[in-house]
Each structure stands twice: as C-alpha cells, then as structure tokens.
Amino acid sequence: MAAEALLVSLLALAPLASAGDDALLLPKAEIPEDRLVDVAIDLFSPGVDDSPTAALLQKGIRAAVRKSEARYLPIHLRNTLQSTGQWGAVRVVPGGAAWAEIFVAGTIERSNGKDLVVRISARDAAGRAWVDREYKQRADTTAYAKDRPVDGRDPFQALYNRVANDLVRARDKRKPRELAEVRDVARLRFAASMAPDPYAGYLATGRKGRARVERLPAADDPMIARIAAIRDRDHMFVDTLNEYYADFYARMDKPYDDWRAYSYTEQGMLDSVNRKSLWKKIGGAVAVVAGVVISQGGNNSGGIEDILVLGGIAAVQSGFEDAKEGGIHKAALTELADSFEGDVTPLLVDVDGKVVQLTGSAEAQFTRWRQLLQEIAATDQPLPADINLLPTAPAEVAQP
C-alpha cells in the first residue's frame, strides 16, 4: 500500500513530457523512392559491466536488465522509425553493418524507470555524421498508471520521437545526388566485404575519413550480380533475426513496463528512505554530542543530558533500521533484474542441401553468417536457398 501511495504522489508531481513538442514528423505526401533510405540499427551498448563493484550494481540494478534493454530499446526505435513511413527498410542488425546506408548506434547512459539517457550516433555509408548527441527524457508517468492500456504509449516515447525527427531532418538536408552516392557506397562496401579483390579498389577514402566512389562496376559484371543476390540473402537472414527480436520485444514488453513502473516507485522509496535515514543519523549524533557536552558542563540540567543521549542513540538506531529497509528495496530490484536475460534461438540455414546450424548469441550467429557468405562469395557454392527457424526433415545438420 505504501508503494502504491508513493507512486500516486509521484505521478501527481512529476513533470510530463510535452507530446506536442515531440510529435513525430510524418510525410505530407508519398516519399519519392530515391529518398527512402534503408536504416540499420545496432544493438545498444548497455553501458555497464558485471563486476561486483560496478556502480549500477551498487544501486541494486543488475547488468542483466541493461543487457535486455540493449536489445529492447533499438527494437522500439526501429518500430518508431517504421511507423513514420519516412524510410525504406529499417532493421536491427546485431554487431553493426558498416555497409548500411544509414547505421545507427546507441549507448544507454542511464535507465531507471524515472529517467532515460542514451547517446545516439548515426552515420551514412560514406561516413557523414547525421546525428551524434545525447538524448534525455523524464518518464511520462501516466504510462505507469494501473489502468494503462496493454499497448499504451511508452513512458519515454518522446525521446524516440526526437531521434526519429532528427534523422528525418538530417535526411532532408541531403541532396538527391548525395543520397544516390550513399546507396552506391553501401553496395560497394558490401561487395568489398564479400570479395575484397577486386571491389575494395572501387572506393577511396578522403582526408576526413569519408568514402567516395572511384568507379562503378560494369552493368553486366556477373560477379556484382552474384554479390547483389548474396546481399538479398543477407537481408533475408537479418529479417529472420528481426522476427526473433520482435518476439523478444513482445515477450519483454509487459514485464519490462511493470519493472520500470516498479523501479520508479522503488527508487523513489529508496531515495526517501535514504534521506530519512541520513537525517535521523545526523540528528541522533547531534543529540548524543549535545548530551555529552551538557553532562560535562557540570550544571544541574535536570537529567536533560540523559534524555538527549538516550534519544540520540535511539534516533541513530532508527536511522540504521531505515537503511536496512533500503536494503530490502535494493534486493527487490535485484530479484526483478534476474529474469531479463534472454537467449537467442539457434537459426538453421539450408545451403546446397546442407542445413547449417548457427548457435550462440545474435552477434555470434551474425558473425558466423557473414563468414558463411564470404565463403560462398569466394567459391561457386549455390546461394542459401532457405533461411528459417525450423526446416522440415533436414538431411544433414552441419555445426559451424
């Protein structure tokens, strides 16, 4: 009951984000195809470690929460970008993709249910910075109300909207030829990653580290056609991974919202307990000192020094009891955090009648997939015919 009462008071006092100021920029007409740039979003850096002395752990929050958030937040950003209709394909790409037309990376600097602070950087394939800034947002605590809809507004939606709007403004500053160059560079970067010889020489790097096209392959180049087909298979694989991430997002959505709401309440209670405990300890210590000073003065104070000393000791003890209550709140946060570490389902890829199983984290699977593509590009192996989660009766499963 105390927790519910505190949450009600916090909801009443906390400032709300202005939805009007952070409304998504939506297209007023259909976006021309040559301005529909594809976006790849890396998993965010959680910004924490697992060491016992980590600052986050000292506050009672486990790194497992941040690791799950590092998946959840980029998926939510992807969903926000997709909802605007301003972009081409928007995908979460674990481990990043230097060959993406637009590549977005992020670091979680603070996330506690009350405040979200992330550092977002976005660059195009040529190396131009589109966005590089820190975003801060205080939670819209109406999203934590008990009667909130199941698919309601994210408490930090305004932050995602600002990121999306900044990306749109950056794109709108680009001339058509610049966007065309971005697409060419992205295609050649992918080709060079698959077949460094001969495609690495098609790009050059300027003094500012920006890539530029030196020359383009011939329109009838059979190898570039094969690379394009490999890139299509790569998109299929990433789309399959994104189905997993969408499932992870759906499973995490409700408990994560509950965790954030509870964390908001717990952090408020913890701060209140810590302040009360500190003042009790200070007041108690002052009372003890005052009692000692009076007793040493030798004046007849009618036993007031005993009252001060005994009362001061009681206050200090009460402060330590409050601090112990704070430890209970920290334990509650830690217990909640333990349930958020998710595993990646193994993916099975059919290559020339052989089913290759990709296991491990999403990043590990993605790395092995890239190695597989490079091997295919360097030989005459057929392209992957099927990418799915449960192939029917595979003849052979090859371990990576």
Image (cartoon, helix red, strand yellow):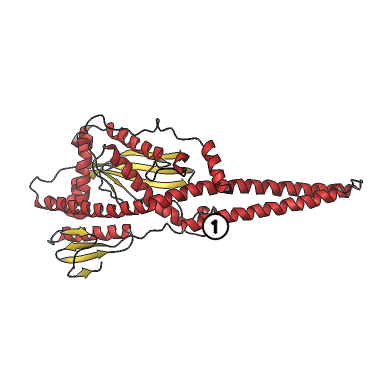
- Pick whichever, 135 or 150, lies toward us: 150
- Pick whichever, 25 or 122, lies toward us: 25
Q: Is residue 273 left or right of residue 194?
A: right
Residue 101 percent coordinates (x, y): 25, 43
Q: Is residue 141 above or below residue 252?
A: above
Residue bearing mark 1: 331
Residue 100 percent coordinates (x, y): 26, 46
Residue 360 percent coordinates (x, y): 32, 63
Other residues around mark 1 within 10 Å, as few (<14) / some (14–19) / many (≥20): some
Residue 57 visible in the snapshot: no
- Please identify the residue farthest to the bottom as the structure is shown: 396
- Pick whichever, 204 or 161, lies toward us: 161
- Pick whichever, 203 or 245, lies toward us: 245
Q: Residue at x 17, y 70 (%)?
A: 395
Residue 392 visible in the snapshot: yes
Identify the amino acid type marked 1: Ala
